[in-house]
Image: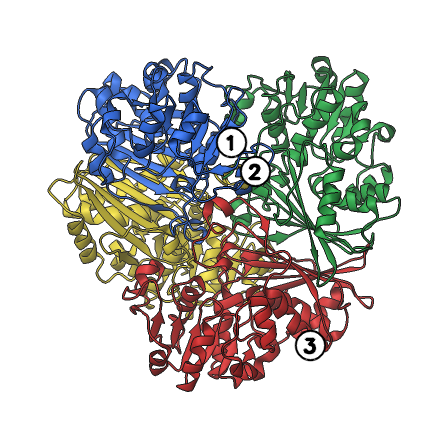
Chain colours: A red, B green, C yellow, D blue
Amino acid sequence: MAVIGATGYTGVELVRLLCRHPDVELTVLTSQSYVGQPFWRVYPSLFRYVELECADSAPELVAAEADVAFVALPHGHAMGVAAALLDKGCRVVDLGADFRFREKQTYEQWYRIPHTAPELLPAAVYGLPEWYRERVRTASLVANPGCYPTGALLALLPLVRAGWIDLRGIVVDAKSGVSGAGRATTLTTHYGECNENLRPYSVPGHRHVPEMEQELSLIAQAEVRIAFTPHLVPMTRGILCTVYATPLRTVSATDILNLYRETYRDEPFVRVLPEGMLPQTKAVAGSNYCDLAAAVDARTGRVILFSAIDNLVKGAAGQAVQNMNIMCRLPETRGLEQPALYP
Amino acid sequence: MAVIGATGYTGVELVRLLCRHPDVELTVLTSQSYVGQPFWRVYPSLFRYVELECADSAPELVAAEADVAFVALPHGHAMGVAAALLDKGCRVVDLGADFRFREKQTYEQWYRIPHTAPELLPAAVYGLPEWYRERVRTASLVANPGCYPTGALLALLPLVRAGWIDLRGIVVDAKSGVSGAGRATTLTTHYGECNENLRPYSVPGHRHVPEMEQELSLIAQAEVRIAFTPHLVPMTRGILCTVYATPLRTVSATDILNLYRETYRDEPFVRVLPEGMLPQTKAVAGSNYCDLAAAVDARTGRVILFSAIDNLVKGAAGQAVQNMNIMCRLPETRGLEQPALYP
Amino acid sequence: MAVIGATGYTGVELVRLLCRHPDVELTVLTSQSYVGQPFWRVYPSLFRYVELECADSAPELVAAEADVAFVALPHGHAMGVAAALLDKGCRVVDLGADFRFREKQTYEQWYRIPHTAPELLPAAVYGLPEWYRERVRTASLVANPGCYPTGALLALLPLVRAGWIDLRGIVVDAKSGVSGAGRATTLTTHYGECNENLRPYSVPGHRHVPEMEQELSLIAQAEVRIAFTPHLVPMTRGILCTVYATPLRTVSATDILNLYRETYRDEPFVRVLPEGMLPQTKAVAGSNYCDLAAAVDARTGRVILFSAIDNLVKGAAGQAVQNMNIMCRLPETRGLEQPALYP
Amino acid sequence: MAVIGATGYTGVELVRLLCRHPDVELTVLTSQSYVGQPFWRVYPSLFRYVELECADSAPELVAAEADVAFVALPHGHAMGVAAALLDKGCRVVDLGADFRFREKQTYEQWYRIPHTAPELLPAAVYGLPEWYRERVRTASLVANPGCYPTGALLALLPLVRAGWIDLRGIVVDAKSGVSGAGRATTLTTHYGECNENLRPYSVPGHRHVPEMEQELSLIAQAEVRIAFTPHLVPMTRGILCTVYATPLRTVSATDILNLYRETYRDEPFVRVLPEGMLPQTKAVAGSNYCDLAAAVDARTGRVILFSAIDNLVKGAAGQAVQNMNIMCRLPETRGLEQPALYP
């Protein structure tokens, strides 16, 4: 298998998971910045785990050496490599945004570049296994969900499908660790700027909004619009989503937790916490879990939902491996069984 | 002047500000745990600034040596000392919750202890200077606002007074640094538990809810109920409030910012950021500022308000000094002029 | 197998590793503070991994349900339980200091309590597998090394054995993450005190000094005394040791690295970094590795050695599992194959 | 007064201190990256404090508007602007390395660029006020010491001058917060790389070595060479130096502390801690203090010295303001009276 764009943070997380996956052999790791260097020189944490050198291979060459390619490139780049990979029979899990939208226009409107491979969109499957497992199973091209959408959708979709909440007025207040911004050296991710600092960003109009709305609307079979505010938190890993909604009927926290438990009964990577417990990002850091909780504020009638994930695992690389496991008819948890590091 | 409960985090922050205040002489620092020790032994940052020893003085003795006493004790303790202080002519700024409520019942319901000095409540002034400066000026007993309420109210009150937002459905999603939990050694504030971790807590039902609702309702002249979710963020100082509301008329971010600028035109410690800038806690850390911003999500029609404060300064000790300055007819900014430490 | 003292940080790290160990069944988890609670309630990161409840079992009962017991108690407590465990045929890996010293007097002098089980000392094996693997193999009672000694000894012992450095004047300047102080809620480990702070502590006279000196002296066959200064670093995991020594002959960094490679050629958990690379704690965090490097300052002739470990893994729980694997004739790396989490 | 290079971290720290300095009027702030932008847009912490725009002014223009210029540029750049400033009668405090060396060759050897203004070196004064106050008083060009040298020299010089320690074998193990690396966006200072990580760097051969050796040798009147190892610590501010030396005579910690107290008796910014207390960086963060302590390890006879400073204050901008105060015959503490922020 191949990781295209292996030296970014989602790339190295894929390598970390795949190099210990018992059914996977890593054959190609591509990188633009580190061509010719052993991968472990870039990430000494993987010294002795990975012998491969970083290569700047064209997709055709990747396809010759891999039956599955994970694409961990900035948005706009997967469009240019996916067709070549697929043509050569290499299935693709894209961790970027290029294939997440049913409508080319949505992508172009929010990402402000033309979509150059719209013919691939119809066959692309949105890789949220808990909701699209069967379609993932037979997909050649999986669009791995964004980190924020993964957390928000796993919390919201059960209530939306059940018709329990007002589709208007949903608020998703999300908080992310800094690794979500990747490894590119920017002022935003400079230690002196983000350490001991908390800030909202991309307000209004973060690019994960249309992705969440698309998926919510599909399940709701009605148009859903959400208010979404992301915040940058001084920690490396983790996303916590706090979701506010207005119930359409009388519901209790117990009701919601029961709905969660029913919806996710057989899900290996969704943990519905017992009533009274709230999620924390550290309890999932390094793992592929999404922890869920719910509360109902009796005084305001407001429903409050919580989800916690590791943005690099369930929010990116771990979910991509989960999708690959499904596509390859492997046990879905293979290579993803590790619990979080705590403390 | 005296600080009662000087060795907690709000206590030391008061000492830090007051020891450099040109019009203040610190005469008494009380503490239960460190009686007889030089204060700087407990906080070596103040070596050479403060020569006083920690004393376990009774309020009568404090009143004999101070004309103003700052009370920085856990809730439930100021009730027992305020009368004795006031009786002796010592004015009081209480940084706890004991005198924040107009109604004794509200306090007793939320804090679950009897109020033992209800006779003092009518004269107590809620010390949010931007809204109650004139009453503070003549007060003998000021109830310094809670940290979360300070941030939330400064953002919300102008819109509530102007009647611009629906009083139902207000959401306050707040994020606080760990120093807000004080210096008591608990598992929640243990480094291994809160470092690299993000978690909601006290959901639903944090004790700052009734305080915010009381103040919002007073200004609105109608009952306001809010959904409030606090989160613990792995940093020492800072509170960011993200507030969601539904406008009752068409408003733009520009409108809200103009309203803010008008409301807070002469306020020394409220900074309305230019449109397009969002607050960050680091820009106020160590300072007495509250930074404000606003956005309107055109797609959902939702108003989003932001405020950032240092929970220990504008959220506690700094605001207390500001109140004292007002009470003592000193320039309001005296001793509070320092900008934030950045980076 | 059993973990005695499972709810401290070394305890939960043992549980994290053992619950995924393919040849281990956890049968008893003891705790004083959480008796009767499911272990995952205390550590929600292990929700779905561990069903056991915390029990306050006497050692006899532990021995009835486990063939190996890991003792993760504060020093002074293992002395009281080891004999009972061993008598019942339960082998013991003690992660505390009680059995690390060849001489009862050394223990009593540094830990300032009487040793109540001195009869067990002769058979206890110091569990540094890289140097005492064969003795560990047949041991019933293994004294797992301290975190600092593990890092310092792996760096120093090869040079000491080879006679390359002056035994006088060795300096070990060590820096540790806060989790090394355990889960007890103290002021030292309170977030507000140790976040964004760096401090030396226990100078001179940290209790790991005699342990390092004992082991260095044994290999040197001469008395070795070291200057050791530990520092508390604002991060959760990791120890970096910077060791200064005076060479007795002309050596280059290349020479030392070659000596390291030769000494640790077949070691699964010691990685000698290529010349020019320096260790970093993040590259080993969550893993059982010790990364080594060396430099020679041509201008001063000084040898500088570096080692990085995760204090909770190679410095505690991971090394304990490694010892157990050896004792049980399992592959030594079983259950310890995970690379570090990076970033 | 002017700050040349105002938008880096030492630049903004100068602006933070100078904008509140009662005897200073800031007239020019230069920047290459932010020309034409209000300074507070770059650093919103200083909103309402500084109205100046960033300018890309030539030194001649700066000199026309300022009688003192602080130069906070990367090394190699002050050489090109100092002469022009001095020629126009503008005194200069350079915070970089260009004028720190008595010998042009030393600079060129360690910084690997030609020195283009060697004619200025004889008149440049090394601005460590505790040791060169009188020379600073009359200087036109002050070379502000490096951050590591400030901490190490204040701890070492008293013992070196007194002849108490062996000049061979001095070890300086230093630990710095990340802000010391400036605001340039590099991988080293990328949050994901340095958060929760501890690493040595520049071993052997950090550029602060010759600076420390020059100053130690001058006071010792003999050649001194030190082993110096800097480490990057996951915190924003602070340097802790741990210094190891061999005493030439029997000394106790008390002796060393007495020597410190005598040497620094009238120093406003050196605090000798009482015996038994050890410095911590948080106790000086944001302040201009250097906290000193000492220990003697009776077992090894080794002297251990400790100093803590804020690398951006006493290690850079604060010391520069202190030098300026001396040069301008202002009270030396003017504008530098603030204690540290703690917690």
Q: Which mark is residue D45?
A: 2
Q: CA distance from mark 3 to mark 2?
A: 45 Å
Q: SS of the residue at dot 2?
A: helix
Tell me the quadrant of the picture where the C terminus of chain D can be found.
Answer: top right
The chain identifier of the residue carrying mark 2 reads D
On screen, residue D303 versus residue B183, left or right, reads left
- At 45% from the left and 71% from the top, the residue drawn is A77
Asked if residue C24 shows in the view, the reply is: yes
On screen, residue B192 versus residue D166, left or right, reads right
On screen, residue D206 versus residue B277, left or right, reads left
Q: Nearer the viewer, residue B43 or B217?
A: B217
Does residue A125 lie above or below B45 as drawn? below
Of callouts 2 and 1, which one flags the residue occurring earlier in the amino acid sequence? Answer: 1
Q: CA distance from mark 2 to mark 1?
A: 9 Å
Does residue A105 lie above or below C327 as drawn? below
For the residues tagged 1 and 3, is the chain the same? no
x, y percentage for residue C137? 29, 61
Q: SS of the residue at dot 1?
A: helix
Q: Which mark is residue B172?
A: none
Q: Which dot, 1 or 3, sits closer to the camera? A: 1
Q: SS of the residue at dot 3?
A: helix
Pointer 3: what residue? Answer: A219
Q: How many marks?
A: 3
Q: Which mark is residue D16?
A: 1
On screen, residue A154 versus residue B220, left or right, reads left
x, y percentage for residue D1? 46, 25
